[in-house]
Amino acid sequence: MFDDFIKIAENFSGVIFDLDGTILDSLGAWRDLGAKYLLRFGIVAEKNLDEILFNMSLREGAIFLKEKFSLPKTSDEIICEMNLMLEDAYKNEIALKRGALDALRFCEAKKMRVCAATAGERRLEEAALARCGALDFFEKIFTCGEENTSKSQPEIYLRAARFMALPPQKIIVVEDSREAAKVARDAGFATFLVQGEYEL
């Protein structure tokens, strides 16, 4: 997965990694969250539940589950309990994606600047990275929540670039989202999709 990244990364001075789905193999925890939560009430979810919930916020998903399945919980209680499930997954289960540690070690050996830009929660992702021995590879983790932005605009990548004191042309952004990669590319960054696609 990261073999092609390693081949081209030495042409750059810095890397901005996405975390969920790129460095951390965490998408399954999110994808299965609704179905696992419903099992607590003896409810087997329909097969397309993850697709329905995928584009919803946690609050929207909680309201949807409460109303559709008549759950005996408030939406706030559902959110709290689902957050605890996620926290447990990040602290105890979620691993690194195949090849991610090799990619991080390569960047360290080449003395590249390394940051992360994530839409996830710092405390969850740092817990998983620390458990997997990967946290110290990152100089700084930028989160959309703390930066009050989203990956539909390039600001989080540009702030990471300013922190690294590098122009976008010297940085490669590694993402699992084609839409986020396009945003970064339009802002002047080279991009690498973990599926193996690379674009200047």
Image (cartoon, rainbow, N blue to C red):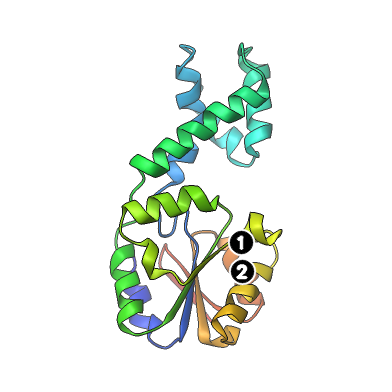
Q: Position of residue 17 (x, y in %)?
A: 48, 67
Instruction: Tell me the quarter of the picture where residue 148 sits.
Output: bottom right
Q: Quadrant of residue 5?
A: bottom left
Residue 38, percent across and down?
Answer: 50, 20
Q: Is residue 170 left or right of residue 109?
A: right
Mark 1: few/some/many CA within 10 Å (<14, 14-19, 20+):
few
The answer to whether 3 appears left or right of 176 in the picture is left
Which residue sits at x=55%, y=51%? 120
Front-most of residues 95 and 34: 95
Marks 2 and 1: CB-CB under 8 Å? Answer: yes
The crowd level at tag 2 (other Cα within 10 Å; few <14, some 14-19, many 20+) is: many
User: Residue 28: image x %, image y %?
Assistant: 42, 41
Q: Quadrant of the C terminus?
A: bottom right
Rendered residue at 37%/84% (across/down):
111
**In the image shown, does 81 or 194 lie closer to the viewer?**
81
Report the amino acid beneath label 1: Glu
Q: Secondary structure at mark 2?
A: helix
The structure residue drawn at horizontal position 30% and vertical position 73%, both measured from the top left corner, is: 105
Q: Position of residue 68 (x, y in %)?
A: 65, 18
Mark 2 belongs to which amino acid? Lys
Question: Residue at (34%, 63%) from the top-left corner?
Answer: 100
> Which quarter of the rendered picture does the N terminus lie within?
bottom left
Would you say residue 183 is visible in this rendering? yes
Question: Residue 195, relative to residue 40: is it above or below?
Answer: below
- Closest to the observer, 99 or 47: 99
Q: Which residue is mark 1?
A: 179
Label 1: element kind: helix
Whole-Å distance between the Cαs marked 2 and 1? Answer: 5 Å
Residue 154 visible in the current orientation: no
Residue that carries the numbered disc 2 in the rendered image? 182
In the rendered picture of this protein, how many numbered marks are placed on residues?
A: 2
The numbered disc on residue 125 is: none
